Image: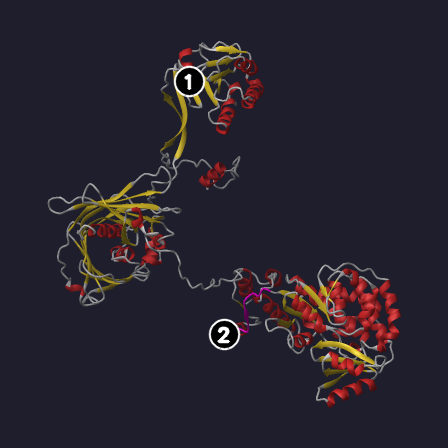
Amino acid sequence: LAAAGRTLAVGRAALAHRAVVVAATAGDAVDGCAELTVRGTPVGGRTAFLFTGQGSQRLGMGRELYAAYPAYAEALDAVCAQLDPWLELPLLDVLFGQDPAPLDQTCFTQAALFATEVALFRLLESWGVRPDFLAGHSIGELAAAHVAGVLSLADAAQLVAARGRLMQALPGGGAMLAVQAEEHEVLALLAGREDELGIAAVNGPTSLVLSGDEEAVEAVGAALAAQGRKTKRLRVSHAFHSPHLDPMLDDFRTVAKGLTFAAPTLPIVSTLTGQLVGAEELSTPEYWVRHVRRPVRFLDAARALEAEGVRTFLELGPDGVLSAMGQDFLDAGSLLVPVVRGGRPEPHTALTALAHAHVRGVPVDWRALFGETAGAAADLPTYPFQRQRYWLTGGSGGDVTSAGLDAARHPLLGAAVALADSDGVLFTGRISARSHPWFADHAVAGTVLVPGTALVELALHAGAARGCERLEELALQAPLVLPDEGALQLQITVGDPDEDGRRPVAVHSRGEQEGDVWNRHATGTVTPAVPAVPDPDLASWPPAGAEPQQVEDLYDRLADQGYGYGPAFQGLQAAWRSGDDLYAEVRLPVDADGFALHPALFDAALHALLLAESAELRLPFSFGGVQLTGPATDTLRVKLSAGPDGTVAVALADETGAPVAGVASLALRALPAGTTLTRPWDPYLYAVERAGAELAPGGGTHLAVLGGTDLGLDAEHHTDLAALAAATADGAAAPDVVVLPVPPAPVQETGRVTQEVLAVLRQWLATDALPAARLAVVSTGELAHSALSGLIRTAESEHPGRFQHVITDGLPADGTLLAAALADARPQLALHEGRAYVTRLAKIVSPAPVPDADPAFDPEHTVLITGGTGALGAQVARHLV
């Protein structure tokens, strides 16, 4: 049960509509699921923690949480360790003992409430629940101040203990009375008697507590009762928040002055002022002195929290005292939930409060709650989505007539156009796994194929547009493989008729990437329709005397053979054999979607041919004499009759036996098991090759050479770029190409050579004297020049047309060939043995695997890919795995 709860909590998305069942047994879980009591949707409000005041204490409060949750136990132990030095008895003995009397002494009551509420806060904190605001009723505000960081635990414990001890030391007597009245009504009755009694708490619009001399309290209570107001005497040891507390205030102030206060890390709404309180007030001893004496303004504090946008209130205390008060006046959209309730199992109540917070959108760390005790994840159903699709399924994305086309009126086609110079017609379409997801349920040898029945249906539709409703023949020449990403463009063409009325039909496709070419998948002929003859064997169903065939595990067996038929293509419901004939009943698992004969239904009609085990994959190769003879249906009766030449005749009828379609001749072709189907758009392997290049004569190009190297060119020489710039500034003609010869050098000087050339490249880009000229670096193929190729290629890619690299073979220069190369605009040329070459990437055929050869990479070991985070590195990584 714990594993199931953990899986549902941390292994499922937290969606808008939420429900939580808190259960200790499987039976409780079943009952809870049958009647969900904690359910809802996240609200936009904020969250506040309310800390309960005195009067809510009870013996054993928190005992079950202490035993169940280490976070609670550790927090309570830590608080008790700080309180015990200030108390006459260990606090845990008072809390969890057998005698209730000590707990009702205010010196222990206040300490016990403080400890319990701080431990509850730490428990919720460990579960990832953090409030936006805090508020506390009387002693509860000291718990709020501590968890907000105003007081350290040691200082808070000292102040709480002093508060209870000083109150306990006061003389007994006095009274407290809960009355049903508004504050202004009571204040009128208290006029002139402020030294005898006062308002101790304003808990609601008409819910007040009076405190003071017993005689005075009784007199005011009697006056209110005479007006029909409810009153109730409270069982207390002292008259709290009244003039009876004045004698303790100086001593309490002295204790408070010895403590260290800090700014709160969580906003606190004060029940002294009824407003959000800042650090300047909370950090003064006088605030806490007035807090002891003045009324508890819970009504104002709760309304202030509501004004701050709080809609979820969690009460931290022994019982739901404040929750009951707040429900009388807070907005109906607010929820007040006590974390603990008296008389109820504490862990169950705490988790129920957590559940209420979760369904209202309060973040909860379920992983922290479940910890490691739930074990492995449970195998549970995923979320029951409605599975309603909203993808546009029409073949056309809009009104194609505006583009001069006709509507195709077919689910796989988008447009049709009559050819201008013939009586033919062209249909176009676009298909993908996204636009037609049921295609993904038809895979053969691990490759998703558009079924041959879809090509037949397309050819029939195209032929019908020219009055040729019969597909005389259709030969499938190449499988139509659906790409994993992107889409395919389709063309179905119907040509001119011959003297007998036959028209050629063809199906082509291509990818949508630049450079993709058209591939032919099927060719055939269409003719006018011929009268249909019903097959009498399909009128009576199931066929009389036929032997039933086992089909229950057919698709599992076919999957083992390499047929990947998903749900959309698992339409075979039953099959029978009678002699050489097979009969089948098939149903379409998906919507008919506007097809005259849905390809998935048509394909399933042929699956009975696969009942016999075969070591080879068999696919339809050619269809002959195909004609639709009835309206579309989602259920077919099928008869498959073997012919003498290995072909099969197919008769299709609806549930009444009326003919729907027929195939005079179907031929299957075997595909050896283990065959991998290729796709025209699969990535090629590329290799670097050097190809010969024809160069035009370069006599018309004005050349200038930097330095004194003789290259056999008809060119002027300049010492460097600065000298060339000076010459052009003096009126010399600007060259078309500036040549930088790179002298030979030993391999040890590769770095120096590269740096010198780089300096010239930078200088070339920095000068404005020759904006239309090209700098041509002439080097040899020696090792010292090896780094120049990449350097100049990079410079040319960043500044197209400004650089050229001519690599010679180091033999005596041929000035004519070099001049022609320098006049050529190609960025890199190689001159070797009197010819010019260019380097390029060329597509190559993947090498056939060598049987029993050791793999190039051992899959059991690690391969280091330099630059693996880049695009090329990622491609190499994908290739290796």
Q: What stretch is highlighted in magenta?
A: 33-44
Tell me residue 827's x, y (percent). 44, 24
Q: Which of marks 2 and 1 is in front?
A: 1
237 above or below 620?
A: below
Q: What residue type is disc 2 on?
A: Ala
Viewer can see residue 814: no
Check disc 2 and report the residue beneath it. 34
Q: Indicate the secondary structure of the residue bearing disc 2.
A: helix
The quarter holding residue 639 reads: bottom left
Which sits in the foreground, 549 or 208? 208
Viewer can see residue 570: yes
Check disc 1 and report the residue beneath it. 823
Distance from disc 2 to disc 1, alpha carbons, whole Å, reads: 87 Å
Tell me residue 269's x, y (percent). 72, 66
Q: What residue type is disc 1 on?
A: Ala
User: Which residue appears at 52% of the width and 36% of the height?
Assistant: 865
User: Which residue appears at 80% of the width and 82% of the height?
Assistant: 190
**In the rendered structure, which disc, 2 or 1, sits on the residue that comes first in sequence?**
2
